[in-house]
Image (spheres, helix red, strand yellow):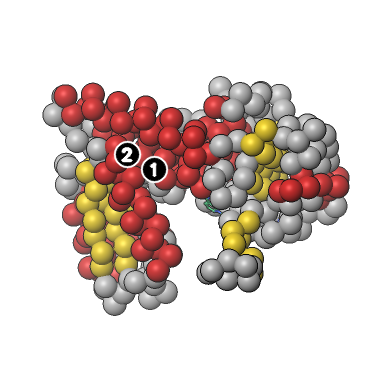
């Protein structure tokens, strides 16, 4: 039986409507949530991510403070911009678009962001709070995965979740969030990576697979059991001469074959992607509410 497709665009749209209503309530109290976006250099992919974030802010009524800085900015100058945003009461969230040019010390910059404005959830203070189960800003893509599962009615409690990939921005946090003793979690989690021996042994036992490897066809139909729920975080370019731009985007999962065995599956694009920016908006609104 073919899987039901999880429509990430629709879930993101629903969440943005909820956030729009929260922003309207805050505005009645004279509070306008503000997000400072800091982009260093001219990287086209980063520019387009930043534009999408700014547009999403405008759509739901968040004030977007656009800071486009030259690639040759010094570490001191960049740190001064972060400090200025830390002290600006109009700003509730600060986002430094990564990667930074190689001459800059990324971790020093991220560490300088006030944890109360760290809406990306990458500051070690927020990572630590997440791990011990305290309230904190949750990193956007993993939190988007948790929301997709919850809003699609997937029972995570007691499920065996296999996460493929152990990066600090996706694999490790999503594994941690789903194993917390709380609502929309309580899963038994197995974390796989390139040193995992016989990964199919684990994925075949999974009730839920979260693929975040960044490699096409990491998960194939022979690696999953019937009825599995599959969340594909991967975004990979593969050559496609039939497309005007010469490539198309695919996930980490062999979608066409796996969807015949799965009960639920996310497409790429249109699955996890739309949730990432939504969760950034969510954190910014939450920060404004906290303030
Ligand atoms: P990353 O930093 O490159 O990490 C990839 C992880 O996958 C590593 O832990 C690696 O293991 C593991 N891995 C790679 N190939 C594997 C294989 N064949 N079998 C098992 N494990 C394998 O990537 P990332 O930043 O986490 O991103 C992962 C994917 O998600 C990328 O395609 C990225 O574009 C996408 N992404 C999407 C969004 C979104 O909004 N949709 C957001 C963030 C990322 P080792 O640690 O052993 O090397």
Q: Position of residue 165 (x, y in %)?
A: 66, 52
Q: Residue at x 78, y 40 (%)?
A: 260
Q: How many marks?
A: 2
Is residue 108 left or right of 250 when viewed as pictured? Answer: left
Q: Position of residue 61 (x, y in %)?
A: 25, 38
**In-front residue for pair 106/251:** 251
**In-front residue for pair 76/258:** 258
Assign the C terminus to one quadrant of the image: top left
Secondary structure type for disc 1 = helix
Q: Is residue 67 above or below residue 140?
A: below
Is residue 42 left or right of 273 when viewed as pictured? Answer: left
Q: What residue is shown with label 1? A: 280
Is residue 252 left or right of 182 when viewed as pictured? Answer: right
Label 2–label 1 contact, CB within 8 A: yes
Q: What residue is shown with label 2? A: 284
Q: Residue at x 35, y 57 (%)?
A: 50
Assign the N terminus to one quadrant of the image: top right
Quadrant in which ligand 1 is drawn = bottom right
Where residue 116 is drawn, which disc sits there?
A: none
Is residue 191 left or right of 34 when viewed as pictured? Answer: right
Secondary structure type for disc 2 = helix
Q: Is residue 290 visible?
A: no
Q: CA distance from mark 2 to mark 1?
A: 6 Å
Q: Residue at x 44, y 49 (%)?
A: 122
Q: Position of residue 135 (x, y in %)?
A: 43, 30
């Amino acid at each position: 039986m073919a899987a039901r497709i999880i429509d990430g665009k629709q879930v993101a749209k629903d969440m943005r409507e909820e956030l729009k209503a929260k922003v309207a309530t805050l505005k009645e109290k004279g509070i306008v949530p503000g997000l400072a976006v800091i982009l260093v250099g001219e990287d086209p992919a980063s520019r387009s991510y930043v534009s999408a974030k700014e547009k999403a802010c405008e759509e739901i009524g968040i004030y977007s403070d656009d800071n486009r800085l030259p690639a040759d900015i010094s570490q001191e100058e960049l740190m001064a911009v972060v400090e200025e945003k830390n002290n600006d009461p109009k700003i509730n969230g600060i986002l430094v678009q990564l990667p930074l040019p190689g001459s800059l010390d990324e971790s020093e910059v991220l560490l300088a962001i006030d944890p109360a404005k760290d809406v990306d959830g990458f500051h070690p203070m927020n990572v630590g709070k997440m791990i011990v189960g305290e309230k904190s800003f949750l990193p956007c893509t993993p939190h988007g995965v948790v929301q997709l599962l919850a809003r699609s009615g997937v029972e995570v409690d007691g499920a065996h979740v296999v996460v493929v990939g152990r990066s600090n921005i996706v694999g490790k946090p999503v594994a941690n969030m789903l194993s917390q003793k709380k609502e929309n979690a309580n899963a038994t989690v197995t974390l796989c990576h390139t040193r995992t021996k016989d990964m199919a042994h684990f994925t075949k036992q999974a009730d839920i697979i979260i693929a975040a490897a960044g490699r096409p066809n990491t998960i194939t139909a022979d690696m999953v059991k019937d009825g599995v729920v599959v969340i594909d975080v991967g975004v990979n370019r593969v050559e496609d001469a039939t497309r005007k731009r010469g490539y198309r985007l695919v996930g980490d999962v062999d979608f066409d074959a796996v969807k015949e065995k799965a009960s639920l599956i996310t497409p790429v694009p249109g699955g996890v992607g739309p949730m990432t920016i939504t969760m950034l908006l969510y954190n910014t609104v939450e920060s404004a509410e906290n303030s």
